[in-house]
Image (cartoon, rainbow, N blue to C red):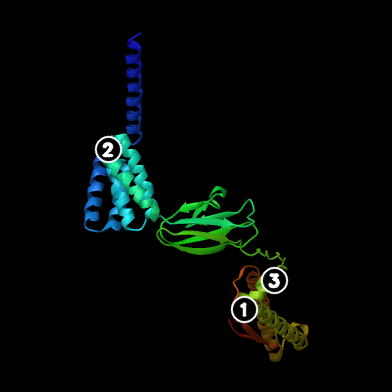
C-alpha cells in the first residue's frame, strides 16, 4: 500500500517528461541558426535599430521558439509602437519561460505585460442594422460578428476599416489611435450598387461605333474600281469586236479591221484582269468587316472612267 503513492508519482513524472519531450519535438527546427539570428537581432537592438532587429527575432522564432527571443522581440516592438504585438509576445514569453523553468524571464515578462496594458489603445467597431452577410476588414484582416461592439486592442497609429455588404458599394474609413486611447467607430454601409442592365447589340454594332478597319475601305474600294474597269473595257471590247466583224468580210480583214481585232483582244484581257482585281478587293473588304481592327479616322474616294479607275484615301 505504501508503494502506491510512489508509483503514482513515478507515473506522473513519466507523463510530464513525455509531454516536455513532445513539446520539444513539436518545436524542433534549427537551434544553431536560431541562436545566430538572435545574436544579430540583439546587436542591432543595442545599436538602437529595432526596426532592423525585429525580422531577425521573428526568423529565430520560426527556427526555434525560446523565451529569451520572445522578450527581445517584445521589447523592440514596444520601442517601435507595435504595442498590441508586444503585449502578445510578453504574454507568450511568460508562458514559454514557465515551460523552460526560467523564473527570471517569467517575472520580467509578467511585469512588462502589466505595465504595457494601460498604454494599449482599443477600438470598438459598430455597424448599425448590419445584414448577416456583412463583413468588416481592419487593415485587411476580416473581423467576425463576435468582434463587433467589442473593444479590441490595437497598435497606435492610423488604421483602415472597410465595410463589405452584398448589393452595396464598399465603404472605407480611416481611424487614428493614440496610446491609451479608447475609441468607438460607427460604420455605415456604402450606397446601393446600381447594376447596369446588359444591352444586346446588333452584330457589328460595336465595330460601327469604333470605326471600320482600313481593309474595308481599301478592299471594297478596289473591288469597285476593278469591276468598273472590267465593265468599261468589256463594253469597249464588244464594240471593237463588232467593228472587226464589219471590217473582215469572208475572214479577210482590212488594216482597220486588224487594228480593231488587236484592240478588242487587249481590251478583253484588261476587262478580265479588272474583274479578277474586283474579286480580290471584295474578299479583302469582307475580311476587314469580320476581322479587321478599326481605325480612328479613315476616308476613301473612288473615281471610275471607261478604261481606268482610281482609289484615293486616308487611313
Q: Is residue 276 visible in this depiction of the protein?
A: no
- Name the residue beneath numbered marker 3: 205
* Quarter of the image where one finds residue 302: bottom right
Q: Is residue 95 left or right of residue 272?
A: left
Front residue (pair 107, 284):
107
Front residue (pair 55, 178):
178
- Name the residue beneath numbered marker 1: 218
Give the distance between the C-alpha atoms of the residues marked 3 and 2, in whole angstroms.
80 Å
Res. 103 mark: 2
Q: Is residue 165 above or below residue 306?
A: above
Q: Is residue 295 left or right of residue 306?
A: left
* Quarter of the image where one finds residue 28: top left
Label 3 sits on a secondary structure element that is helix
Label 1 sits on a secondary structure element that is helix
Q: Determine crowd level at label 2: few under 14, some 14-19, many 20+ residues with C-alpha closer than 10 A.
A: few
Q: Position of residue 214 (x, y in %)?
A: 60, 77
Amino acid at each position: 500500500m505504501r508503494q502506491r503513492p510512489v508509483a503514482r508519482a513515478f507515473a506522473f513524472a513519466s507523463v510530464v517528461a513525455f509531454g516536455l519531450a513532445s513539446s520539444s519535438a513539436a518545436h524542433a527546427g534549427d537551434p544553431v541558426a536560431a541562436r545566430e539570428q538572435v545574436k544579430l537581432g540583439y546587436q542591432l537592438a543595442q545599436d538602437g535599430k529595432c526596426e532592423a532587429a525585429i525580422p531577425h527575432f521573428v526568423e529565430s522564432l520560426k527556427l526555434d521558439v525560446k523565451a529569451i527571443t520572445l522578450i527581445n522581440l517584445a521589447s523592440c516592438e514596444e520601442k517601435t509602437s507595435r504595442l498590441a504585438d508586444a503585449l502578445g509576445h510578453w504574454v507568450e514569453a511568460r508562458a514559454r519561460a514557465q515551460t523552460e523553468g526560467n523564473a527570471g524571464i517569467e517575472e520580467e515578462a509578467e511585469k512588462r505585460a502589466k505595465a504595457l496594458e494601460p498604454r494599449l489603445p482599443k477600438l470598438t467597431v459598430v455597424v448599425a442594422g448590419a445584414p448577416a452577410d456583412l463583413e468588416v476588414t481592419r487593415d485587411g484582416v476580416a473581423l467576425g460578428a463576435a468582434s463587433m461592439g467589442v473593444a479590441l486592442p490595437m497598435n497606435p497609429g492610423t488604421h483602415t476599416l472597410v465595410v463589405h455588404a452584398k448589393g452595396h458599394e464598399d465603404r472605407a474609413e480611416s481611424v487614428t489611435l493614440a496610446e491609451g486611447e479608447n475609441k468607438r467607430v460607427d460604420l455605415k454601409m456604402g450606397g446601393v450598387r446600381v447594376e447596369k442592365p446588359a444591352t444586346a447589340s446588333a452584330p457589328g454594332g460595336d465595330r460601327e461605333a469604333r470605326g471600320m478597319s482600313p481593309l474595308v475601305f481599301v478592299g471594297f474600294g478596289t473591288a469597285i474600281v476593278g469591276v468598273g474597269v472590267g465593265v468599261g473595257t468589256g463594253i469597249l471590247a464588244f464594240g471593237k469586236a463588232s467593228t472587226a466583224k464589219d471590217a473582215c468580210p469572208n475572214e479577210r480583214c482590212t488594216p482597220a479591221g486588224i487594228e480593231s481585232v488587236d484592240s478588242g483582244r487587249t481590251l478583253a484581257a484588261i476587262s478580265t484582269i479588272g474583274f479578277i482585281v474586283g474579286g480580290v478587293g471584295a474578299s479583302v473588304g469582307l475580311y476587314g468587316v469580320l476581322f479587321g481592327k478599326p481605325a480612328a479616322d479613315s476616308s476613301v474616294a473612288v473615281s471610275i472612267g471607261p478604261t481606268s479607275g482610281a482609289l484615293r484615301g486616308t487611313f
